[in-house]
Image: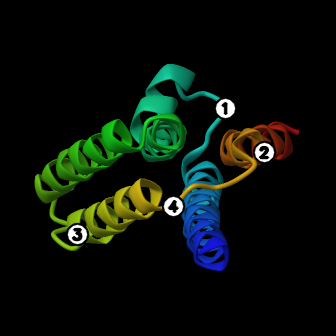
């Protein structure tokens, strides 16, 4: 009986850390692409964050909520996926909505069933690495 419980717990940890890894990779790559491609020193920084880093902010925020409250996090992932699918369907890029919405929905399911332990380190990695990418690339682009 105890061996089964350990296998279940290990499976939850693997699923949880998979969700954290996918979130960090997706958020960091989106941030990298946004800063390298669109950053200009004369641009209003508030508009830049809203236009180009909103997906990164939504990913990190929903991941952090999901690690604390899995049910609320699943609902938040679904809501954010629906919002981005709707926002990107307004443009000419009809494939961008599903390419963002489907991974967000899958991440919500992974966070719902997985438990990354230790949770404190999972949270630190989730918000820390995209922040390092933002700060590092911004400094590189400014100088």
Instruction: Evaluate if marks 2 and 4 touch, with contact meaning CB atoms under 8 Å apart.
Output: no
**Distance (Cα) linking label 2 and label 4:** 15 Å
Of the image marks 1 and 3, the number of the one nearer the N terminus: 1
Q: Which residue is mark 4?
A: 114
For label 4, the SS is loop
Apparent side of residue 31 relative to residue 114 in the rendered image (left or right):
right
Q: Residues within 10 Å of mark 1 (few under 14, many from 20)?
A: few
For label 3, the SS is helix
**Distance (Cα) linking label 4 and label 1:** 41 Å
Q: Which residue is mark 3?
A: 98
Tell me where residue 123 sits by quadrant: top right
**Distance (Cα) linking label 1 and label 3:** 32 Å
Of the image marks 2 and 3, the number of the one nearer the N terminus: 3
Residue at horizontal 33 percent and vertical 36 percent from the top: 72
Q: Is residue 26 above or below residue 45?
A: below
Q: In the image, which is nearer the foreground, mark 1 or mark 3?
A: 3
Expressed as whole percent of the image width and height from the top left, the position of residue 139 reads 84, 38
Expressed as whole percent of the image width and height from the top left, the position of residue 63 reads 50, 45
Which sits in the foreground, 81 or 115?
A: 115
Q: Which residue is mark 2?
A: 121
Report the coloring of the rendering: rainbow
For label 1, the SS is loop
For label 2, the SS is helix
Q: Which residue is mark 1?
A: 41
Residue at horizontal 62 percent and vertical 77 percent from the top: 7
Q: How many marks?
A: 4
Instruction: Evaluate if marks 1 and 3 touch, with contact meaning CB atoms under 8 Å apart.
Output: no
Image quarter hosting the N terminus:
bottom right
Of the image marks 2 and 4, the number of the one nearer the N terminus: 4
Q: In the image, which is nearer the foreground, mark 3 or mark 4?
A: 4
């Amino acid at each position: 009986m105890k061996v089964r419980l350990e296998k279940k717990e290990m499976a939850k940890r693997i699923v949880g850390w998979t969700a954290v890894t996918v979130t960090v990779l997706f958020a960091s790559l989106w941030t990298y692409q946004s800063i390298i491609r669109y950053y200009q020193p004369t641009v209003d920084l508030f508009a830049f964050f809203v236009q180009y880093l909103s997906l990164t902010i939504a990913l990190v925020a929903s991941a952090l909520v999901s690690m604390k409250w899995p049910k609320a996090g699943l609902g938040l992932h679904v809501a954010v996926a629906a919002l981005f699918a709707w926002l990107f369907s307004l443009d000419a890029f009809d494939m961008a909505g599903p390419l963002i919405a489907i991974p967000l929905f899958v991440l919500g399911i992974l966070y719902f069933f997985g438990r990354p332990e230790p949770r404190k380190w999972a949270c630190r990695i989730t918000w820390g690495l995209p922040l390092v990418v933002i700060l590092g690339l911004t400094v590189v682009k400014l100088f």
